[in-house]
Image (cartoon, rainbow, N blue to C red):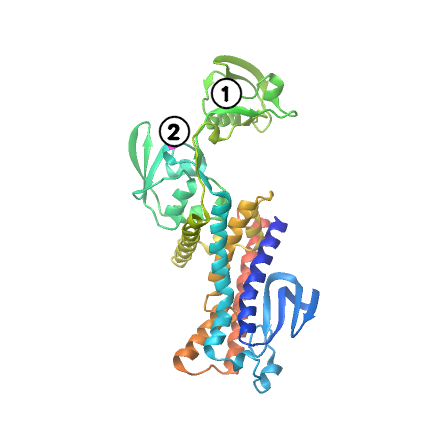
Amino acid sequence: MIGQLMLSLSILIVLHEMGHFFPARWFNTRVEKFYLFFDPYFELFKIKRGDTEYGIGWLPLGGYVKISGMIDESMDKEQMKQPPKPWEFRSKPAWQRLVIMLGGVTVNFVLGFFIYIMILFAWGEEYLPADNAKYGIATDSLGIEMGLQNGDKLLSVNDKRMEKFSDRFLLTEIVFNGATEMKINRDGQELTLPIDSKWISELTSYKNKNERLFIPRFPFAIGKVPKENSPGGAAGIQVDDQIVAVNNQPTPFHDQFVAMAKANKGKEVVVTVERDQQKKDFKLTLTPAGKIGLLPYNYDHFLDTERQDYTFLEAIPGGIGKGWNFLSSQFKAYGQMFRGKIKVTESLGGFGSIGTLFGKEWIWERFWELTAALSLILAFMNLLPIPALDGGHVMFLLYEVVSGRKPSDRFMEIATVIGFVIVIALVLLANGLDLLRLLGFFK
């Protein structure tokens, strides 16, 4: 997780800073430093090339380029007291300064959409059509509390039909679009279930961030028998056996077996399997956790998934659409925060929360998916009109372009300090919440 997080952030930071660096060089503006990560007091590596010092800092909270004649977080007041030099940022026309400041977020926006495009081009998209989930859903405690039952078929949410089977469809419609009802098929009868507004905050709470609402329901057929610690394997159950009952209670589906096994933790049970169209009984003792020690086939062994491959030209609109859908969901999430429907303390997280998203296994498709999302988030956050962020500089430059008056250096110094304090406070809040969760203050 740490390796993936560091690589992802390094890619995003370096490319973001290049978005400032190259426009500055194009306009003959001197760049004094180009750093990955911050370097208070000392750096891990540095090298001087021309007028620019390139280096790696030790504090992985971002990166920066120090542009001559620009009031930034370095607060180089001595330089600003000198008469403007032709190569300095402050000597350039407002439109050139605006291009330099917008370069970073532009790169991150373009990068995010480009990665989504390349993901579709490289891996395509495999999904389960909702109509192919013939056994319905297998739901857990959250879904049950919402009114769903095992075997239900989700048809639509607020009249928006679920085309691709995913519990994220229901979550998205509730959290971002404020859905108030869903239609299901239960035992051949169509029902409408109301959705309480409390689910907006419930589904975005930290305790539920990794919880699934439901998965496809599927039979329990044995896909693998581990060599060790397998009560089922020791009893004689084999690959391709399909478990159909426990203690003579029918369990044709995986979720039914799991429920029965949990109810008989550590006990001796009789498991009935179907093998070559014949039923066989096996007596075994479940583990203290209620496990049989056998791995089932995944749902795609029983349900027909579909795959869509993309040419590069086809991936362009598809990738842009994925990126825009992600961005729009973020806008809606912030709107729900301002309305108080999503709690900041529940949904905000720092590097720890981000790192857990990558998982403990390095999967390149997931890595690039998260990197694309982080790139778009970084672009959006940097556009916020907070002094010390790119958006703050852009705000003052737009004021200068419209009014023809340039804010004084003193005003910019004060605004930058205030903005820097705000940014540091937000970073501390996000990572502080991660620490408090780790210590058990938030469940």
Residue 31 in view (yes/no): yes
Q: Residue 225 is drawn in which quadrant?
A: top right
Label 1 Cα neighbours within 10 Å, binned few <14 / some 14-19 / many ≥20? many
Q: Which residues lie in the magenta part?
A: 132-136
- Is 83 or 396 nearer to us in this picture? 83
The CA span between labels 1 and 2 is 19 Å
- What's the residue type where badge 2 is placed? Lys
Q: Pinpoint residue 227: horizontal percent, then vertical percent.
A: 65, 24
Secondary element at tag 1: strand
Secondary element at tag 2: loop
Residue 436 in view (yes/no): no
Please tell me whether residue 101 belongs to the stretch shown in magenta.
Answer: no
Magenta portion: prevailing SS class? loop
Q: Nearer the viewer, mark 1 or mark 2?
A: 2
- Relative to 312, say whether 74 is above or below: below
Q: Pinpoint residue 375: horizontal percent, then vertical percent.
A: 51, 57
